[in-house]
Amino acid sequence: MREFNLRHGLLGAAIIAMIINLAIISINSAQTFPLYGDNEITNATVYGIMKYEYGDGLYVDISADDSDRYDVELIDSENRTYNGNSGPYRSELHGFPTETDYKGSIRDMLLFDVPDETIIKGIRIVPSQSAPFYINWTEMPEITGENATLRFYGATFEPNGMRWRQGNWNLDISINNIGNHTAKYNSSSFALMDQFGWIYSGEEGEELKEIPAGESLRFTVKVPFVSELSDPIAILFKGLNLDISAWTIRR
């Protein structure tokens, strides 16, 4: 029988603990959506949000108990509210032919009139027959490196008519320059990794965007010619790996 080595035993325990911690982190990040809320009488589920492809606005994929009608409002980081009271926007959830009915629930894609670059922090649901309730979600993903903080706000997939079954991912991000000198970035400074581990580079040839020290800039990173089978799970930037798997749009 091999003699037990205390040092090796402690090292093994530390490695196991590290693996468990990493697993917990992965599980937590993957549970951003769906999100649930209720008022003890009725309940709702938010499956995700995505940008409106024809202008300012946000889609919300949501379901609720089919026994009621619901007015829904989005709430931003400054506690302003947004609805969809005029076409093409719509923010009332109720029985409707386009909705998916499943076991007493209704599910629909609502569209809210929200200005570009708004940071949404939650949703207010107002049933017609019971008390309002809220569903809040965590801050958008961010990561900090030696000279920059990268923050992710959302993404859209744009089919590319030039290549079959490929398209462009447009990533809504911001960079906070925490270094001491002006930084310059464009889409080619970033890359996108899919669920298979394949890495797609950001578009080449864009004009560099200057970010002075201590300032931040929000802009769109374009990643072209991505397979429609690829689901983005991470943004790669200057040695940083930002997990976005819980926020990217599933087609």
Image (tube, grey):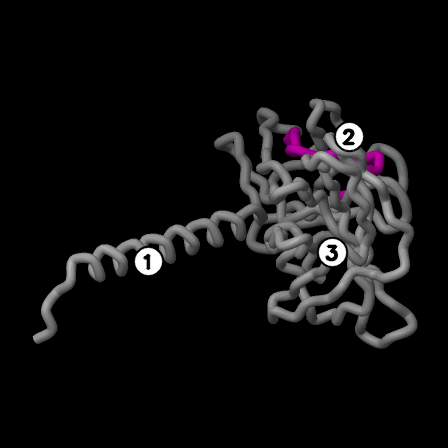
Which residue is labeled 1 in the image? 15
Q: Which residue is mark 3?
A: 190
* Quarter of the rendering containing residue 101: bottom right
Residue 53 among those drawn in magenta: no
In percent of width and height, residue 194 lies at: 65, 65
**Amino acid type of the residue that numbered disc 1 sits on in the rendered structure:** Ile
Residue pictured at 84% horizontal, 34% vertical = 115
Per the model, the C-alpha gap separating discs 2 and 3 is: 32 Å
User: Farthest residue toward the left?
Assistant: 1
Q: Residue 235: x and y, percent?
A: 67, 55
Where does the magenta region start and end?
110-127
Binning the other alpha carbons within 10 Å of mark 1 as few (below 14), some (14 to 19) or many (20 upward) gives few
Q: Secondary structure at mark 3?
A: strand
Q: Is residue 140 above or below residue 12?
A: above
Q: Earlier in the sequence, mark 2 or mark 1?
A: 1
Residue at which label 2 appears:
82
